[in-house]
Image: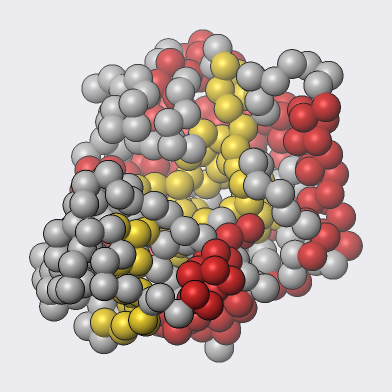
Amino acid sequence: MSRIFLAYLATWNKFDIASMPAEKLTHVCYAFANICDSQVVLAPSLARGSEQLAQFEDKFKQLQTLKLQNAELKIMISIGGWGAEGFSDAALNQQSRQEFARSAVQFMCERQLDGIDLDWEYPSNAMAGIKARTEDKGNFSLLLEEVRQALDRQSDLECRQGSARYQLSIAAGAGQYYLDGVEIERVAQTCDFINLMTYDFYNGWATKAGHHANLYCSSLDPTGDSVDSAVQLFIDHGVSPAKLVLGCPLYGRSLKGVGRAGLGALGQAGSNAAPGFHKIMTELLPSNRFVRHWDEAAQAPWLFDGDEFISYEDCESIERKGRYAKQLNLAGVMFWELSDDHHYALLNALHDGFYS
């Protein structure tokens, strides 16, 4: 498989699909489809025939027009997401797994897509408030294998060969907590690639000002999480670098009440927010409230106004991640999510780093 440059695109954000630089992308994951009674559906809360559901469906037609710019572009449906229910039940037994795989492939074919991306956050783990069972660990492998077999049968039926065969990927949490709940070597063998969510190290529950997507550990947080430690963790657990797609956030994580110390200081619990890069560039930085700082050890920027701390990705940090992924011969890079970018500045910087 050629190197991957993948964009996630959220269903709920307004976005001009026609403006996307399709020539720079290899994959687009449209997020999210949902699960209802072990079947893949687009939006179970919307009435059949409603105007909003029709708008969702129209997005798939718009995405297909991108292939006029790039005939090799793969458009995939991402199923699940944070707080998405239904995975544990769908994976529970052979009948439910077969029904899920059948409906997922049908969903894909009806919309002329090129593959399926499963975003179960997370097998065996109820942190997102969804149902979790200890059996999820083995059942996740079985579910993926059922989907893999269904995709391969469909590829054979359509005489698809080589890179034209239908693809299967997952989004994976970037820590030991994720690996504890899955059979990662078996999972990696089944998937074409793994989208590693190397961000949210300091997230919406953080009470300390820390980097949420730092390439390396900060000197102020030497035992904390980092992109590099997550990648090495997966490699140490038997995942080939050629299966790993490095994730980058196009949004920041903020915390108020930090005080004069800035990075590394405690803040106000519950004051967290997640400003997109577009908002950072068009509202926060032009306000002249914030000063940009650079953490050389972490290879990550942060903003501070004396009270509010913002960890974010900018062109300098994301370009270095592209070079890092290239140097380690990873499968590729991806980002969540495209509508948060500002004039595709981060996309272009990541592309320059990865393909330079």
User: Which residue is nearer to you in this view: 179 or 276?
Assistant: 276
Nearest the viewer among 64 and 260 is: 260
> In which quadrant of the rendered view does residue 33 lie?
top right
Residue 44 located left or right of residue 146: right
Task: Identify the image quadrant of residue 77.
Answer: top right
Which residue shows up at 66% across the image and 25% down it?
A: 43
Residue 151 visible at all: yes
**Which color mode does the image show?**
secondary structure
Is residue 22 shown left or right of residue 225? Answer: right
Q: Position of residue 204 (x, y in %)?
A: 32, 47
Q: Is residue 328 visible?
A: no
Query: Would residue 321 be found to the left or right of residue 20 on screen?
Result: left
Viewer-nearest residue: 291 or 84: 291
Which quadrant would the C terminus be assigned to in this image? bottom right
Q: Residue at x 20, y 63 (%)?
A: 258
Which quadrant is the N terminus positioned in?
Answer: bottom right
